[in-house]
Structure formats: C-alpha cells, structure tokens
Image (spheres, rainbow, N blue to C red):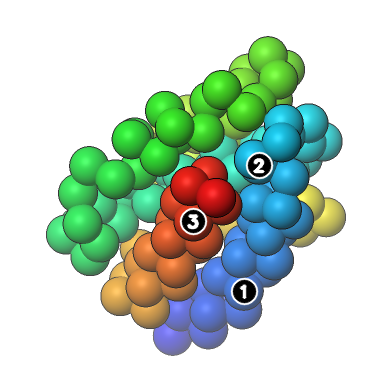
Amino acid sequence: MRLYRRSLRIVPLIVAVLSVAIDSVPASADMSKDTSTSAGSFFAAALLCEGHDRIPQGQTKQLMKDLEPYLSPRNKSWMQEGFERGLKDQSVFIPKSGWVKLTSDEAECYRVQGVLDDYRSQINE
C-alpha cells in the first residue's frame, strides 16, 4: 500500500515535468538533460503500460518517432538513455527526486495515456 500511495504522488510530477517539454515540441525542443531523461523514462513507462494492455498498443514507439524531428541530437541521446534505464528498472526519472519505481497500474497508465494524448496534440498542431 505504501508503494501504491507513493506512485500516486509521483504520476502528477511526471505530468508536470513533461508538460514543460510539450510546450516547446512543435518549434524545436531543446530540453535540459533532466527533462530529456525524464521524457525518455516516461516513454518507457508508456511502453510498459502497453505491455500490460492498459493503454492501446503501438502508439508509444510511433509517437517517439513523430517527436524525433523536433529534438536536438543531445536531447535524442538523453531521451534514449532515460528510455533504456526506465525500461530496465521499470522506473521514471523525476528531476530533483531521482529514479522512482513504477507500478504500471490502471491509475498510473490512465495518466500516462493522457500525457501521450497531449504530446500527440502538440505535434499535430
């Protein structure tokens, strides 16, 4: 129960961190290392949610591909590092908090889907 409560507090942080990155996507995103790492780990969380059939499958990798033209080379590298570690450890990187384990439960995945939808709408503007 303690881990579940902690994960509920962390998901809004994920959304807040990624919302900053979303605002700069269409022009050309040059995010900090922490923000890029966090975004990559978020995409790993989304892929984990897809694997548990909690969100539609196939959208995460497509969205990552669609986002790629807007990222600088260093942001791509940092996002990939965050993605790989997030998958390996089943965790997400929160700036100022560090790496936090994910549960990939329904509530977490519901919020993850919302952020994916936000990314998609920003790219399609």
Residue at the disc numbered 2: 25
Asked if residue 95 lies left or right of residue 7, the reply is: right
Residue at the disc numbered 1: 12
Q: Nearer the viewer, mark 1 or mark 3?
A: 3
Q: Amino acid at mark 1?
A: Pro
Which percent across, then down, holds residue 3?
A: 49, 75
Q: Amino acid at mark 2?
A: Val
Mark 1 secondary-structure assignment: helix
Badge 1 or badge 2: first in the primary sequence: 1
- 123 lies above or below 103: above
Badge 1 or badge 3: first in the primary sequence: 1
Is 85 in front, or is 49?
A: 49
At 62% from the left and 62% from the top, the residue drawn is: 14
Which percent across, then down, holds residue 8?
A: 53, 79
- 20 lies above or below 31: below
Mark 3, other Cα within 10 Å: few <14 / some 14–19 / many ≥20: few
Numbered badge on residue 121 = 3
Note whether residue 82 is visible.
Answer: yes
Q: Are marks 1 and 2 in contact (CB under 8 Å)?
A: no
At 61% from the left and 22% from the top, the residue drawn is: 76
